Amino acid sequence: MADTERQTDRRLEQAILQLLQHRAPNATICPSDAARAVYTEDDDGWRALMEPARRAARRLVAAGKVEITQGGHPVDPTKARGPIRIRLLHP
């Protein structure tokens, strides 16, 4: 993996956590929110970061920091298909 990819991965993880920390408890975000936060140009280039943002969310699930939900319920990130939401786990 190239350094630029690793930096983007870290930025996506940080964006997810920062966005969630500024939301109400139990609030969720879409991976697109993180993609848009990292991709700051005015065009639709953020769309290329959607799958990397989903992967970043899965890494954060594995680290015990967030959960992925569908229909308001936690789901196994390896089995989630279609739109997902990300929610901060509170200790």
Image (cartoon, grey):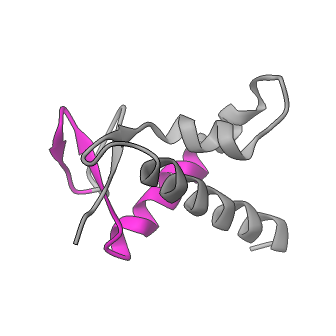
What x and y, as percent, mark residue 50? 58, 41
What x and y, as percent, mark residue 34? 58, 44
Q: Quadrant of residue 85?
A: top left
Q: Residue at x 18, y 36 (%)?
A: 72
76 relative to 26, above or below: below
65 relative to 39, above or below: below
Q: Is residue 19 rendered magenta in the image? A: no
Identify the residue at the far top of this view.
43
Q: Is residue 60 rendered magenta in the image? A: yes
On-image quarter of the C terminus: bottom left
Given residues 12 and 82, the one toward you in this image is 12
Q: Residue at x 48, y 50 (%)?
A: 54
Q: Please state if 57 lies on the left or on the right of 68 as rendered.
A: right
Identify the residue at the far left of this view.
73
Q: Residue at x 27, y 62 (%)?
A: 89
Q: Residue at x 27, y 48 (%)?
A: 25
All told, the count of numbered labels is 0
What x and y, as percent, mark residue 59? 45, 68
What x and y, as percent, mark residue 64? 31, 73
Range of magenta residues: 51-76
On-image quarter of the N terminus: bottom right
64 relative to 89, above or below: below
Q: Please state if 31 lies on the left or on the right of 76 as rendered.
A: right
Q: Please state if 6 lies on the left or on the right of 51 as rendered.
A: right
Given residues 62 and 66, the one toward you in this image is 66
